[in-house]
Image (cartoon, rainbow, N blue to C red):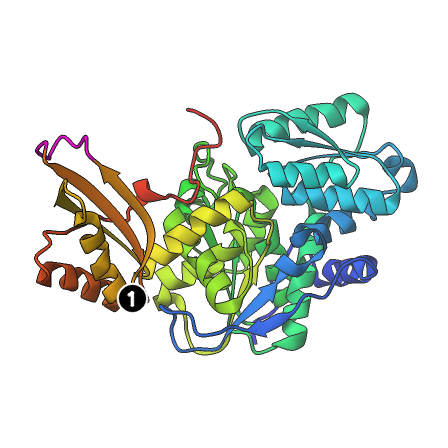
């Protein structure tokens, strides 16, 4: 077996972190996943950090860092910047140690994550258009007030804390052949890599990013931190402009691989986790499944572990994810037709859907349509169907009855999953 690479966060640091935080964190479940369409026929396991206290893996690194601080330094309170999950982790850990915390979050941060961070007792400052600008403000506050800064990913103590996930994976599944995690700043994947290589695991390590925050591939290729434009993704936990220096050093040393996937693929993965595994995952937590689906060629023999890193999903985003998932699996059908503007026509039109056991989800009835004569109306009908085959049968039934229906694509304009720049360009 190859010798252990010299890593800046050794196994001893990860094991010390596990002892330090054991009183507060849950060893999260590692469950065999149900069959997900689009995946190779290998065992797939889900590491459910979405069930961690605060709903995210971030608590591990925050606890390890904050409880590593000397008493005199910790007493001044801590400062951090975050898109939301690190904020909750720092707030929770600071409260556990009995010290104040100030968290800077971008003005576009999830209202759910902002409110939960405040509920944990932290002072929340909303500043900046994205994480990068919030980070700059938080560093200034820490410097001006002489308080320790808790970096979300570019810190050895934080990385060691996240690495405790890797120890738990190996304790239950030492034969893991591929471990996949979402990457924002890279602290999670780097920590897991340190644990795996420290325990001499040969498992391959794969990082997945949204295409709207895709810098890991270029950074690994060029051997330096590549800074991208302002992120554009609904997976706010991964919305960083670049990976951290220390995580990149670690991931290059262990031969990590990287891929990127678009937001709709991530949303479909989040839908599948909810629909098939009964698990609520935020965008960052669903990204590993999305990456595996988009790149099945990366799967070799042996078990795969997908790290479901968080479950703090805004309910409004969930609504969009449900739409995208149903559309992607052919369980929604949208038809458009012109009807004569006379009594009974709409009833006859809807009767076909009833006969074919398709449920009406929405209906739009427009008289003022530019493509219709004064004696016609345009009807757009959205139906719930069992699957794509059923949808095709319903459409065929309409044509067989003489209705000139047109299938309306359920594309991004119909319900994107909240993909957006962190602020207007």
Whether the magenta-drawn stretch holds residue 370 is answered as: yes
Q: Is residue 385 left or right of residue 112?
A: left
Whole-percent x, y for residue 263 in the image: 40, 47
Identify the residue position indicated by label 1 in the image.
Answer: 357
Image-quadrant location for residue 325:
bottom left
What is the magenta range? Answer: 367-374
Whether the magenta-drawn stretch holds residue 55 is answered as: no
Quadrant that contains the N terminus: bottom right
Whole-percent x, y for residue 149 in the image: 74, 35
Q: Which residue is most to the right?
A: 72
Can residue 331 be spotted in the picture? yes
Can residue 238 be spotted in the picture? no
Whole-percent x, y for residue 222 in the image: 42, 45
Q: Which residue is most to the top?
A: 144
Secondary structure character of the magenta stretch overall? loop
Query: What residue is rendered at 47% in x and 48% in y?
Result: 319
Query: What residue is rendered at 47% in x and 35% in y?
Result: 227
């Amino acid at each position: 077996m190859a010798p252990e690479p010299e890593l800046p966060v050794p196994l001893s640091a990860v094991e010390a972190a596990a002892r330090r935080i054991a009183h507060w964190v849950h060893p999260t479940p590692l469950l065999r996943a149900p069959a997900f369409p689009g995946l190779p026929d290998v065992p797939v396991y889900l590491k459910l950090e979405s069930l961690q206290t605060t709903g995210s893996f971030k608590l591990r690194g925050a606890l390890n860092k904050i409880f590593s601080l000397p008493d005199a330094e910790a007493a001044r309170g801590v400062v951090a910047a975050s898109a939301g999950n690190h904020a909750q982790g720092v707030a929770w850990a600071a409260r556990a140690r009995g010290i104040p915390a100030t968290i800077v979050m971008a003005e576009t941060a999830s209202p759910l994550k902002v409110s939960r961070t405040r509920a944990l007792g932290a002072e929340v400052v909303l500043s900046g258009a994205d994480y990068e600008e919030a980070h700059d403000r938080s560093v200034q506050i820490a410097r001006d007030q002489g308080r320790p800064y808790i970096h979300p990913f570019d810190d050895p103590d934080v990385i060691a804390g996240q690495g405790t996930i890797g120890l738990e994976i190996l304790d239950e599944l030492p034969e893991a052949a591929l471990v996949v995690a979402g990457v924002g700043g890279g602290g999670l994947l780097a920590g897991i890599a340190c644990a795996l290589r420290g325990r001499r695991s040969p498992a391959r390590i794969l990082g997945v990013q949204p295409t709207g925050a895709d810098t890991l591939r270029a950074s690994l290729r060029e051997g330096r931190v590549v800074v991208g434009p302002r992120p554009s993704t609904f997976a706010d936990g991964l919305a960083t402009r670049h990976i951290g220096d220390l995580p990149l050093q670690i991931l290059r040393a262990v031969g990590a691989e990287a891929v990127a996937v678009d937001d709709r693929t991530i949303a479909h993965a989040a839908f599948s986790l909810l629909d098939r595994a009964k698990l609520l995952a935020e965008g960052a937590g669903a990204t590993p499944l999305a990456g595996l689906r988009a790149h099945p060629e990366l799967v070799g023999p042996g078990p795969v572990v997908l790290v479901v890193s968080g479950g703090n999903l805004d309910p409004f985003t969930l609504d969009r994810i449900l739409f995208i998932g149903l559309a992607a699996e052919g369980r929604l059908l949208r038809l458009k037709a012109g009807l004569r503007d006379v009594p009974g026509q709409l009833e006859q039109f809807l009767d076909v859907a009833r006969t074919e056991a398709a449920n009406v989800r929405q209906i739009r009835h427009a008289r003022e349509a530019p493509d219709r004569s004064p004696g016609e109306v345009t009807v757009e009908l959205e139906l719930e169907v069992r699957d794509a085959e059923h949808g095709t049968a319903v459409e065929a039934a309409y044509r067989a009855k003489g209705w000139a229906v047109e299938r309306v694509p359920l594309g991004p304009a119909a319900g994107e999953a909240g993909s957006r720049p962190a602020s207007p360009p």
